């Protein structure tokens, strides 16, 4: 079992920055593929960024160039640096972990609110 705890959400003005953190416990962190998702009110949850266990990152087109996903295996943590925030980035952000070794398993954090206002 993997536990994920997010922090770092909050309210910021358009153009501002926030840094989200997600700390994992309960398994060997380095084998996990890590993702950030977000869900805005009335919308489906969407994938924002991925950092695979092999070190490959990818971003949704809407955040590419503005968000940076980093990973610290020694700390069992991932971070999402969000710059040049827009009102459309307002959402609950969720940390997600995927384990592909053996049976596929996926785990979710509790979510953290990000609100961007003009």
Image (spheres, rainbow, N blue to C red):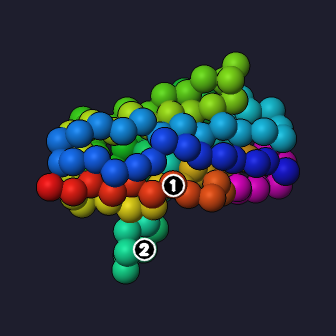
- Residue 83: image quadrant is top left
Residue pictured at 71% horizontal, 39% vertical:
24
- Residue 57 position, x and y percent, is 45, 34
Viewer-nearest residue: 74 or 58: 74
Q: Is residue 117 above or below residue 64?
A: below
- Tell me which segment is drawn in magenta: 101-107
Is residue 25 in sight in this rendering? yes
Viewer-nearest residue: 1 or 23: 23
Residue pictured at 76% horizontal, 55% vertical:
104
Would residue 11 appear left or right of 84 to someone viewing this image? Answer: right
Which element type, helix, strand or loop, lies under badge 1?
Answer: strand
Q: Is residue 46 above or below residue 80?
A: below
Which mark is on residue 44? 2
Which element type, helix, strand or loop, lies under badge 2?
Answer: loop
Judged by depth in the image, the label closer to the viewer, 1 or 2, is 1
Would residue 102 appear left or right of 38 to someone viewing this image? Answer: right
- Asked if the stretch drawn in magenta spans residue 94, the answer is no
Q: Residue furthest bottom?
A: 42
The residue that mark 1 highlights is 112
- Residue 113 position, x and y percent, is 45, 57
At label 2, counting other C-alpha atoms closer than 10 Å, the crowd grade (few under 14, some 14-19, many 20 or more) is few
Q: Earlier in the sequence, mark 1 or mark 2?
A: 2
Q: Is residue 11 above or below residue 24?
A: below
Is residue 46 in sight in this rendering? no
Q: Residue furthest top?
A: 74
Q: Is residue 51 above or below residue 90?
A: above
Residue pictured at 82% horizontal, 55% vertical:
103
At label 1, counting other C-alpha atoms closer than 10 Å, the crowd grade (few under 14, some 14-19, many 20 or more) is many
- Residue 27 position, x and y percent, is 83, 38
């Amino acid at each position: 079992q993997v536990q994920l705890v997010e922090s770092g959400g909050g309210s910021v003005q358009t153009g501002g920055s926030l840094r989200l953190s997600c700390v994992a416990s309960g398994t060997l962190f380095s084998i996990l593929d890590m993702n950030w998702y977000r869900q805005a009110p009335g919308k489906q949850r969407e994938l924002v960024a991925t950092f695979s266990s092999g070190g490959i990152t990818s971003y949704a087109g809407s955040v590419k160039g503005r968000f940076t996903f980093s990973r610290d295996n020694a700390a069992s943590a991932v971070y999402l640096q969000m710059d040049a925030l827009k009102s459309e980035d307002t959402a609950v952000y969720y940390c997600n972990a995927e384990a592909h070794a053996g049976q596929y398993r996926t785990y979710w954090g509790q979510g953290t609110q990000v609100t961007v206002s003009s």
